Image (cartoon, helix red, strand yellow):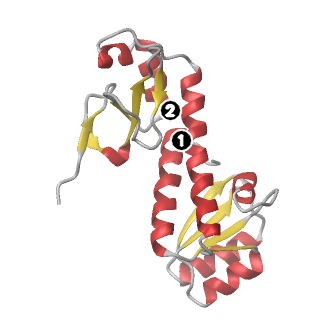
Amino acid sequence: MTVSQRTCIVTRKALPREELLRFVLSPGGEVVFDAHEKLPGRGCWLVNDGAALQQAIEKGAFSRAFKCKAAANAALAAQTGEALRRRVYDRIALCRKAGALVAGFEKVSAALKKGRVALLLVAGDAGEDRRKMEALAAQAQVTVMSGLERDLLGGAIGRDQSVYLAVTDTALADTLLGEIRRLAGFTKKDTL
């Protein structure tokens, strides 16, 4: 199987598409992040890193890539980060709608003990019971993603906050995990 690669406009390295972000030029000449990689037109690719995006904005890399004047303002980085965060939120909501999500310490613990969890999501500021939950996940050989914000986890399932979520469907868990890793790569923060 051939892996589709693109060249980053900042680093000039050819990387798999999954490690890059796609940007397109709007009809008005503004650079726009193409979160779903489906917007029309010739796109350019940038390594998934907020610092690289800032460098591309400051050094005019988008104008060079599009071979015309491309307006890329400082708000582009914030908009890109928010779009990536929204994709994580939407994937968690999709898991809930599909009936493949368990929420709360007791229910998640029970699902882990029964071997029904494909991915465990833990808020970055979880309390002492976090160690118990992570030990259960380790026994069940379940991937744990921690550092997510309580409001992101809760908002996706119709609550103000949530500390523990478990995804029970493997395919949905894999897709969500990819989105979380993409957001983490862009922000380079402990808490997403």
Kindly identify which residue carries mark 2.
50
Q: Position of residue 110 (x, y in %)?
A: 69, 86
**Hey, what amino acid is under mark 1?**
Lys
Quadrant including the N terminus = bottom left
Residue at image location 76% in from the left, 81% down from the top? 106
Q: Nearer the viewer, residue 137 or 36?
A: 36
Q: Is residue 49 left or right of residue 7?
A: right
Closer mark to the observer between disc 2 and disc 1: 2
Distance of mark 2 from mark 1, alpha carbons? 8 Å
Looking at the picture, how far across and down is residue 29, in whole percent? 44, 14
For residue 147, what is the image quadrant?
bottom right
Mark 2 residue element:
helix
Mark linked to residue 19: none
The quadrant holding residue 128 is bottom right
Q: How many marks?
A: 2
Question: For this view, does 53 lie left or right of residue 63?
Answer: right
Within-10-Å neighbours for mark 1: few <14, some 14–19, many 20+: some
Q: Residue furthest bottom?
A: 114
Q: Estimate the x, y position of residue 64 in percent, counting from the top left.
A: 31, 14
Q: Helix, strand, or loop for circle 1? A: loop
According to the image, label 1 marks what residue? 188
Residue at x 36% of width, y 13% of height: 63
| Pointers 2 and 1 in contact (C-beta within 8 Å) | yes
Q: Is residue 17 above or below residue 8?
A: below
Structural crowding at the residue carrying mark 2, measured as other residues with C-alpha within 10 Å and reported as few (<14), some (14–19) or many (≥20): some
- The amino acid sitting under disc 2 is Gly
Residue 97 in the image: above or below residue 179: below
> Residue at coordinates 39% horizontally, 13% vertically from top-left?
60
